[in-house]
Amino acid sequence: MLPAYVHALEAGWSPNTVRNVAPEQLAAIASDADAFIAGLTTRGGTIRLHDGCEVARLPDMIRWIIAADRPERPFVGSINLRWQEDAAGRPVTELPSHVLGHVGYTILPEHAGRGYASAALAAVLVEARIVGLPFLTITCDAGNAASRRVIEKNGGRFVERFVAPFYGPGERLMYRIELQS
Ligand SMILES: CC(C)(COP(=O)(O)OP(=O)(O)OC[C@H]1O[C@@H](n2cnc3c(N)ncnc32)[C@H](O)[C@@H]1OP(=O)(O)O)[C@@H](O)C(=O)NCCC(=O)NCCS
């Protein structure tokens, strides 16, 4: 699957929607592909924000989305779940101010509109329950109708419209998905 991932990065796709991480990921893969793959599931370390600051990487899960409904099983995107833990290692729902939500996802443009983001978010909700989170916060740009629909189809309840100045002046929508029945 790594060649398909590299192909997507080379075509300009980025798994991070607030910062284009394609160049640095391509360099990391070229330098040591095994270390790059291992790093996807490693805990700790730092990540770089769009302003260049390095911050602690939260506990997270990064999942590559494979289209199991197609015979060629193409790589179609990625989704990740991140959260914080208290001193005892228990998950807590609060997030640092630079993290807009618990979940981020992005689908390659050529595979959009086939239900992959909706299915991927449904699968991540199962993982979030296993982590022990009682609810998730997910945000999207106010104009991102497709992402709003993905969230709403997965039970997202609109919370508020807000602006995160650190990420620019645009309005964003915050949703909450309850994980406890
Ligand atoms: C947003 C994104 C993740 C959607 O992925 P996707 O796989 O196409 O999503 P799905 O096919 O599962 O669902 C999309 C839904 O939005 C609907 N939709 C798409 N465009 C729409 C529009 N302009 N207006 C209203 N609804 C729209 C689709 O009809 C579908 O709903 P339906 O199943 O009820 O018909 C994808 O377009 C993407 O990666 N965009 C760039 C990155 C991004 O915005 N990530 C989200 C950050 S919060």
Image (spheres, rainbow, N blue to C red):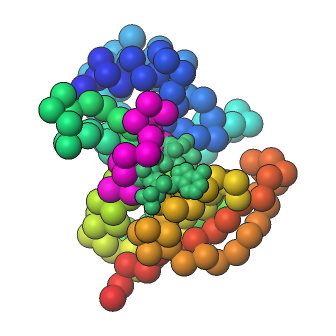
Q: Quadrant of the C terminus?
A: bottom left
Q: Name the spot of residue 72 as percent of width and height, x first.
A: 18, 28
Q: Name the spot of residue 8 as percent of width and height, x first.
A: 42, 23
Is 13 placed left or right of 131 in the picture? right
Query: Would you say residue 46 is visible in this rendering?
Result: no
Residue farthest toward the top in the current orientation of the protein: 30
Is 24 placed left or right of 122 in the picture? right
Q: Is residue 72 above or below residue 121?
A: above
Q: Name the spot of residue 134 as percent of width and height, x first.
A: 41, 79
Could you tell me which residue is drawn at 39 percent across and 11 percent down?
31
Residue farthest toward the left in the current orientation of the protein: 71
Q: Quadrant of the N terminus?
A: top left
Q: Is residue 79 above or below residue 71?
A: below
Q: Is residue 115 magenta?
A: yes
- Residue span colored magenta: 106-119
Q: Is residue 130 above or below residue 164?
A: below
Query: Would you say residue 119 is visible in this rendering?
Result: yes
Q: Name the spot of residue 40 as percent of width and height, x first.
A: 35, 37
